[in-house]
Image: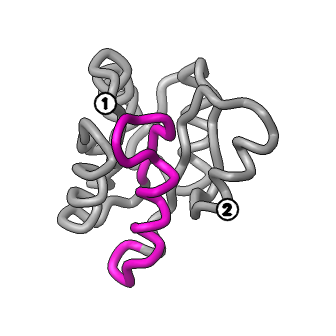
């Protein structure tokens, strides 16, 4: 089963994202903060990382830089999920090593489209 690591500090949003990934047919691996996300990425080797950007302590950009500097995780696609929407903020996500971004709030269909750019769905998708 394909794995998606969800790094999100807000419990309700993390739970919603886990549920959405499971609806798409993926094994969702939750992480409560960036440090835990980096650790789980190294352990689990997910097919995609959905990374919140604004988190206390280490933020998502710093986590992306760490993941890109490690040979074991450097090729895992990272999709930034962020409430930041200014062009400079979004560019900084890409410069930190994220492959793309999705701006919160987003719909299930928008998330599904972004995820599909990086990994194929293991089962039929919900329309």
Calculate the distance from the C-alpha at mark 2 to the C-alpha at mark 1. Answer: 26 Å
Q: Disc 2 vs disc 1: which is toward the camera?
A: 2
Q: Residue at x 25, y 67 (%)?
A: 42
Residue 71 marker: none
Is residue 47 visible in this depiction of the protein? yes
Q: Nearer the viewer, residue 56 or 50?
A: 56
Is residue 119 visible in this depiction of the protein? no
As drawn, the residue found furthest toward the front would be 57
Residue 95 marker: 2
Q: Nearer the viewer, residue 8 or 119?
A: 8
Q: Residue at x 31, y 15 (%)?
A: 12
Q: Residues within 10 Å of mark 2 (few under 14, many from 20)?
A: few
Image label count: 2
Q: Which residues are magenta?
A: 49-73
For marks 2 and 1 on the same chain, the one whose residue lies earlier in the sequence? 1
As drawn, the residue found furthest toward the left would be 43
Residue 76, given in percent of the width and then of the height, sits at 44, 66
Residue 18 marker: 1
């Amino acid at each position: 089963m394909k794995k998606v690591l969800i790094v999100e500090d807000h419990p309700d949003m993390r739970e919603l994202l886990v549920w959405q990934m499971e609806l798409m047919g993926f094994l969702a691996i939750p992480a409560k903060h960036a440090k835990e996300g980096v650790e789980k990425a190294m352990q689990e080797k997910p097919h995609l990382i959905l990374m919140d950007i604004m988190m206390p302590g280490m933020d998502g950009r710093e986590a992306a830089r760490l993941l890109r500097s490690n040979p074991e995780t450097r090729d895992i696609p990272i999709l930034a999920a962020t409430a930041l929407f200014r062009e400079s903020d979004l560019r900084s996500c890409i410069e930190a090593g994220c492959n793309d971004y999705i701006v919160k709030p987003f719909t299930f269909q928008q998330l599904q489209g972004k995820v599909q750019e990086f990994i194929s769905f293991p089962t039929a998708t919900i329309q």
